[in-house]
């Protein structure tokens, strides 16, 4: 039995079977590349599922982590901690929100946002949360109640009360659903797990107008789309909507577990001492990494680069669509968050890409999802498109 077989066999034996793992045994990463133990190199357009915005082995992130590890790894939130405060100052400066709470993950940030909204609603008599169909907000019971996709919900009933869903981009359903009892509407302006679907300007406009009328909160889930991925700090900035609460995670920690919810002045004073908390949230090592990420994204030009390189890649995908109209149904997304919907099962294409040294994700059965690190170059995008063109060319048209 060689070492690799045994590793996969042990995984199968010891773990709950929640993850269908890729058949790769990775040794290390460098920039946009991953290297397997067998020496094979992969160009990574999967990007740790939108976490690895700066790529692998980034010197500034590594230095920030090492320096903080040598000072302290944990104190507890009983202490004021400089790495947290510096990250908070930077985040609030970049986002325009008023206050922040740090947790460890996306789903925890969503739980916190639900609690913040509920506390706010309790004072003004609003109780009902609305999510969108095809959404994904996380796996814990509150976030799962807002998540609409059935494959994540099956068997976990009952969910939170006072939650309903309206059709994605369905303005009429939204108008019919909201009223004075509406506490908040939560949405991904670009749905990630759902297959890279983008909110329409009509829907965004209606949401703004209805908030004006009924006074509910808009909660943006920017866990996948935020931190500069689309060329703006938050995806909602493309849509002329300013949410009251935003949740972030994934890219912010530079690969360490970190998430947060932020709120504007409407909700700034809702939480009081002891009304929410966490043991590990805002870990100082993760916050130090987060500060390095924000410096690179904001001052190092990476946000601009993510937008421009992503737009270039999208243009190349549109060319593929023109060339293979029967195979490529639609190209969607912004910046380094792109989806190519095929008119057939995407998995064989993803498998063939992997065989050729390119890592790509397939979501929603037929959508190839691209979440490259922002440091990816146009030349690397060209390499990917070349292979994809070759693979599509070999399929029955
Ligand atoms: C990944 C994701 C989450 C959940 O984040 P976890 O860190 O896995 O809990 C929530 N919302 C969106 C939009 C995501 O992409």
Image (cartoon, helix red, strand yellow):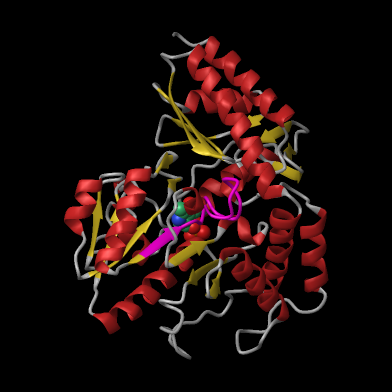
Viewer-side residue, 243 vs 43: 243
Answer above or below: position of 361 versus 50: above
Q: Residue 68: where, in percent of width, then height?
A: 78, 72
The residue located at (82%, 62%) in the rendering is 63
Answer above or below: position of 268 versus 329: below
Residue 373 appearing in the image: no
Residue 92 inside the magenta-drawn segment: no
Relative placement, left or right, of 257 versus 35 is left
Give the quadrant of the N terminus. top right
In the image, the segment drawn in magenta is 218-234
Answer above or below: position of 32 versus 397: below
Relative placement, left or right, of 298 versus 20 is right
Residue 272 appearing in the image: yes
Q: Residue 216: where, in percent of width, then height?
A: 30, 68
Name the chief secondary structure element in magenta.
loop
Q: In the picture, residue 218 is in which quadrant?
A: bottom left
Give the quadrant of the C terminus. top left
Total marks shown come to 0
Q: Residue 99: where, in percent of width, then height?
A: 53, 76
Q: Residue 203: where, in percent of width, then height?
A: 32, 47
Q: In the picture, residue 146 is in which quadrant?
A: bottom left
Residue 229 inside the magenta-drawn segment: yes
The residue located at (34%, 80%) in the rendering is 119
The residue located at (24%, 73%) in the rendering is 127
């Amino acid at each position: 039995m060689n070492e690799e077989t045994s590793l996969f066999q042990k995984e199968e034996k010891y773990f709950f079977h929640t993850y269908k793992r890729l058949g790769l045994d990775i040794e290390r990463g460098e920039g946009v590349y991953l290297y397997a133990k067998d020496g094979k190199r992969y160009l990574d357009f999967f990007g740790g599922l939108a976490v690895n915005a700066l790529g692998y082995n980034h010197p500034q992130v590594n230095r920030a982590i090492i320096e903080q590890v040598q000072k302290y790894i944990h104190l507890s939130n009983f202490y004021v901690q400089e790495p947290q405060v510096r990250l908070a100052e930077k985040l609030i400066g970049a986002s325009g929100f008023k206050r922040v709470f740090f947790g460890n993950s996306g789903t925890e940030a969503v739980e916190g946002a639900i609690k913040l909204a509920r506390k706010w609603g309790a004072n003004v008599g609003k109780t009902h949360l609305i999510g969108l169909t095809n959404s994904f907000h996380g796996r814990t019971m509150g976030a799962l109640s807002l998540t609409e996709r059935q494959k994540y919900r099956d068997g976990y009933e009952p969910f939170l009360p006072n939650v309903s869903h309206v059709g994605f981009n369905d303005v009429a359903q939204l108008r019919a659903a909201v009223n004075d009892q509406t506490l908040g509407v939560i949405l991904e302006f670009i749905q990630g797990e759902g297959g890279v679907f983008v909110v329409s300007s009509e829907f965004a406009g209606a949401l703004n107008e209805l908030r004006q009328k009924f006074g509910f909160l808009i909660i943006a889930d920017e866990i996948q789309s935020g931190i500069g991925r689309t060329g703006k700090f938050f995806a909602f900035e493309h849509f002329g909507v300013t949410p009251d609460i935003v949740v972030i995670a994934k890219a912010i920690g530079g690969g360490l577990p970190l998430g947060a919810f932020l709120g504007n002045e409407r909700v700034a004073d809702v939480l009081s001492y002891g009304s929410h908390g966490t043991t590990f949230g805002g870990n100082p090592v993760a916050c130090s990494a987060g500060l390095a990420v924000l410096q690179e994204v904001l001052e190092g030009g990476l946000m601009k680069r993510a937008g421009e390189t992503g737009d270039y890649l999208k243009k190349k995908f549109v060319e593929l669509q023109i060339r293979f109209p029967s195979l490529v149904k639609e190209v969607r997304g912004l910046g380094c968050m792109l989806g190519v919907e095929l008119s057939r099962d995407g998995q064989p294409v993803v498998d063939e890409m992997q065989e050729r040294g390119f890592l790509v994700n397939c979501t929603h059965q037929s959508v190839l999802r691209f979440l490259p690190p922002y440091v990816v170059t146009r030349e690397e995008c060209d390499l990917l498109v070349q292979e994809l063109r070759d693979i599509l060319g070999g399929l029955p048209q």
